[in-house]
Amino acid sequence: MDICVQKFGGSSLATSEQRVHVCDRINEAYEKGCHPVVVVSAMGRAGDPYATDTLLSLVKSADSQQDARNLDLLLACGEIISAVVLSEALNARGLKAQAVTGWQGGILTDANHGSARILSINPKKIYSLIEAGVIPVVAGFQGATNDGEITTLGRGGSDTTAVALAAVLKTGYVEIYTDVDGIKTVDPRIIPDAPTLSTLTYREIMEMAHLGAKVIHPRAVEIGMEAGITIRVLSTVEPGKGTIISSGKEVEHPISDRVVTGIAYISNRAHVRIASEQDFNQSKLALQIFQELANHGVSVDLIYLSPNLIAFIIDQEMSDLVKKVLAPYRLNISVEKGYTKVSVVGAGMHGVPGVMARVVQSLEQAKVGIYHTTDSHANISCLIKEDKLTDAVQALFQEFELSNKEGQE
Ligand code: ADP
Ligand code: ASP
Ligand code: MG
């Protein structure tokens, strides 16, 4: 019997009514002659009793850093609860299922708590359940180190569990079920009628995921690309064709030659500016600053370094920590919250003149101030004020004709 890996996101598992749809999808796979291996996220979203953000809020405080090992222990519970609840629902439907934690499922990770990487998977337990005719319901987003320490894979990491399992079980294919009908040109929370892309290459979605499109975990795409796994993202409730992510070779209408494929954004950023009268290049100060931040686990982005100014953005939750860590240097430092990094993404923009001009012009017309920009071969990112996000996205969406159906479903 073939094996198929199906992953269900937290938004699909929040209520017993929603779990009926999940059971339907699993049952359909079973009836098609495929033995499902199910991966689940924690049930629901912030505010729901067992959602990851709710668990996080139990211990979060602004003035102290939580112990990363403790946090992983806490967060891993969300997915375990979800796996148990879903396997009980499957059992009640007459489908034999058993909940499996990450470590019971043989998922070995490094010790980087909060953002661990899967090192290997020993599928013994999963194969033994399959042989016994039982559906394994694996808790996503978690694993354990060689020393038995429990780890998590980074926010959104259940996608990665699913793709990594598909790689080890050699299924060649994985289904990611969620609350949207596929990957769209932009987050439908901002543009509700953004079209769904029928196909995307690994590279295109990886770029979008790294730049904030939370619909899929970037590491999941990386593993999919390395192992040649076709990933289908589709709706749990009304599964249509969804979006197929692959190398693109077999795609009839590749869209990778589009200048801009989509828009992504990362909110809750703080803009840090450090001015100095003494030349940063002549002192070791710049190095000391970045080393200090790294030692405290602060990741920096949109970095600008010049003789008298260092600027970068951080997760705004890190603002107080950054101020505290840099205080002893007695610098002229400002940390301003309330920014968003918005990016246009497209593998086809490389070498095309005028893309930046179109970005600047459309944002200017929409009265959106730009505080910093950066670009790569496949994206242009702008730092804007958070309260201008919708205006910015709408302007870019129109400028790059992302409602256009060409190459899309
Ligand atoms: P799940 O709980 O299924 O893992 P996520 O919240 O992680 O769900 O991902 C689905 C959400 O991703 C959608 O509800 C949507 O708001 C958001 N999203 C962001 N960018 C996109 C995009 N380009 N296309 C589709 N959804 C997107
Ligand atoms: N529950 C985890 C999160 O909210 C993992 C996931 O949803 O994939 O980030
Ligand atoms: Mg997700």
Image (cartoon, rainbow, N blue to C red):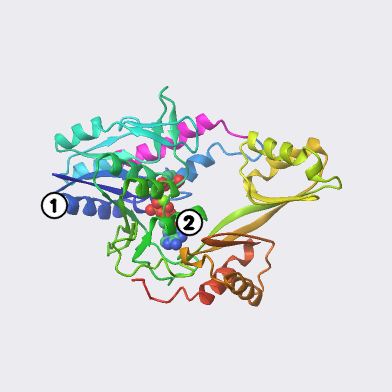
Label disc, if present, on residue 116 of the rendered structure: none
Callout in the foreground (1, 2): 2
Q: Is residue 319 left or right of residue 249?
A: right
Q: Position of residue 91 (x, y in %)?
A: 20, 41
Q: Which residues are magenta?
A: 65-85
Q: Is residue 130 magenta?
A: no
The quarter of the rendering in which ligand 2 is drawn is top left
Confirm whether residue 180 shows in the render: no
- Residue at the farthest front position: 351
Q: Callout 2: helix, strand or loop? A: helix
Secondary element at tag 1: helix
Circle 2 residue: 207
Residue, disc 1: 31
Q: Amino acid at mark 1?
A: Glu
Is the residue marked 1 within 8 Å of ligand 1, measured from its CB?
A: no
Of residue 62 and residue 267, the one placed in the foreground of this image is 267
Amino acid type of the residue that numbered disc 2 sits on in the rendered structure? Glu
Percent coordinates x, y for residue 17 in the rendering: 29, 54
Residue for point 62% across, 34% down: 65
State the quadrant of the N terminus.
top left
Is disc 1 surrounded by few (<14), some (14 to 19) or many (20+) residues within 10 Å?
A: few
Looking at the image, which is closer to me, 335 or 287? 287
Q: Nearer the viewer, residue 56 or 333?
A: 333
Q: Residue at x 44, y 75 (%)?
A: 403
